[in-house]
Amino acid sequence: MSPIVKRKRKKFHIPDKYLLMILSGLCILLMLFTFRTNLFDGPLKSAVGFAVVPFQKGIAQVGGYLSQRSRELARLRDVLAQNQALQEQVDALTIENNQLMQDQYELNNLRTLYELDQAYASYEKTGARIIASDTENWFYSFTIDKGEKDGICVDCNVIAGSGLVGRVVSVGPNFAKVQSIISDTSNVSATVLATSENLIVEGDLQSVSSQGVIRFSQLSDQEDRVTIGDKVVTSSISDKYLPGILVGYISAINTSSDNLTKSGYLTPAVDFSHLEEVLVIKQLKQTG
Amino acid sequence: MKKGIVTALLVFFCFLLQTGVMERISFGGIMPNLLLILSASFGFMCGERTGLLTGFFCGFLADIFSAYGAGGGYGDLIGFYALLYMMIGYWNGKCTRMFYPEDLKLPLFLITVSDLALNLVCYCVMFLLRARLNLGYYFLHIILPEAVYTLIISFIAYPVFLAVAKRLDKPQRGSDE
């Protein structure tokens, strides 16, 4: 045994209070930086895309598999397949019908004014699976398993079935965050298909969670032509959303307190509580 | 060192559960907050330091995967949940002296109070400041249900975390500490 007693080097130790202060400062700095810039997007998102997203994909796949099996148990297999095929057809036809109605309206209105042969080209879409939800209950947002590598960029429109789901607000190499139109901070410029009156669809947690409807406002309709059940589609003056995507159906109309515009509620076309897969339109709205 | 790695893995695992599984067991659109249970329980089980670090990393992960729509068009605001969860971990760490592993009342009480506090702050910062004034509605339909559901889930989650923390706190053979 050696007689020399090794002195233990005292470990450098930051007191808890200071650690808390340092980390709080870091958080506040990060908030200030990320509020207006996307400075940390590159490295942070690559790291997250590498470390977290594969696991989330796995969980989503297992979850999807399990929910699929349980659904199959509940119904007969062939009925389900048939139903799905028919549903796809209905969705496709609804989109087509929507576009046709929009086209026809435009044709009637504009052909007389000037020669405008703008038809809605079918947008290039890509399917994506929802792999993660938000951690909190305050906002309706989710993460999908496609990102920059698949040609998705910020502000890409997201649809499911025949209706609008939301738009991409942030994108990583292999994932993207989608803010849905029922989220409290979301605003969509939309138009009533039958009368082409513009309105603003405002996501509102209170009406969504209590009645499953979205609020709209600033509908100017002096002649009371807009009725309950009218289709509402994204408007051509929106700077984020492509025109003619179905948002929902008007379910209630009230006159605003200023007596000039109307507000009310609309039922979204998409069933937000059972979303598993969505379609992302790769084409961006041209605003320039 | 070993403690750090195990805690980090636990944070990661809970985050995956929170984003992947909780949505599927949500009740009336409300999901329980597992990350909060983790931050709070590591706070009162292991002290302020572990609590605040666990909270910070839980919140940081939550930040990366949330879209508040507040970030000036960029969709990212990193640091908000990290700060909140860290404070929760730290203040729960203040209660370590009152904590006895056999007693279930205090942990459940602390978790519920933490959840209420977290969501009240979230409401004030993200909703009240945007003139959504109906606190009564949000309290009854979002904050309270989440607190109750989180309380129910902590009956399952807390004993698991307690078992992990107990194993970690056992003096290791051949360890420096």
Image (cartoon, coloured by chain):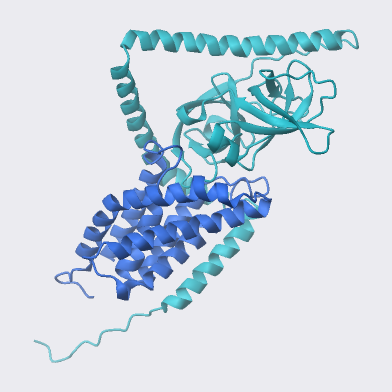
Residue at (26, 63) in percent of width and height = B2
Chain A: drawing colour: cyan
Q: Is residue B11 above or below residue A20?
A: above
Q: Nearer the viewer, residue B86 or A14?
A: B86
Q: Nearer the viewer, residue B87 or B151?
A: B151
Residue furthest bottom in the image: A3
> In x, y percent, where is residue B102?
21, 65
Residue furthest right in the image: A113
> In x, y percent, where is residue A36?
67, 53
Left or right position of B31 against B161: right
> In x, y percent, where is residue A157?
62, 29
Quadrant assignment, res B121: bottom right
Quadrant assignment, res A210: top right
Q: Is residue B133 above or below residue A24?
A: above
Q: Quadrant of the N terminus of chain B?
A: bottom left
Residue at (15, 72) in percent of width and height = B174
Residue at (47, 72) in percent of width and height = A20
Left or right position of B27 against B83: left
Q: Nearer the viewer, residue A277 or B6?
A: A277
Residue furthest left in the image: A1
Q: Is residue A156 above or below residue A51?
A: above
Whether residue A47 appears in this view of the structure is yes
Q: Is residue A143 above or below residue B137?
A: above
Chain identifier of the blue chain: B
Q: How many marks?
A: 0
> In x, y percent, where is residue A185?
64, 43
Quadrant assignment, res A159: top right
Residue at (45, 52) in percent of width and height = B61
Whether residue A282 appears in this view of the structure is no
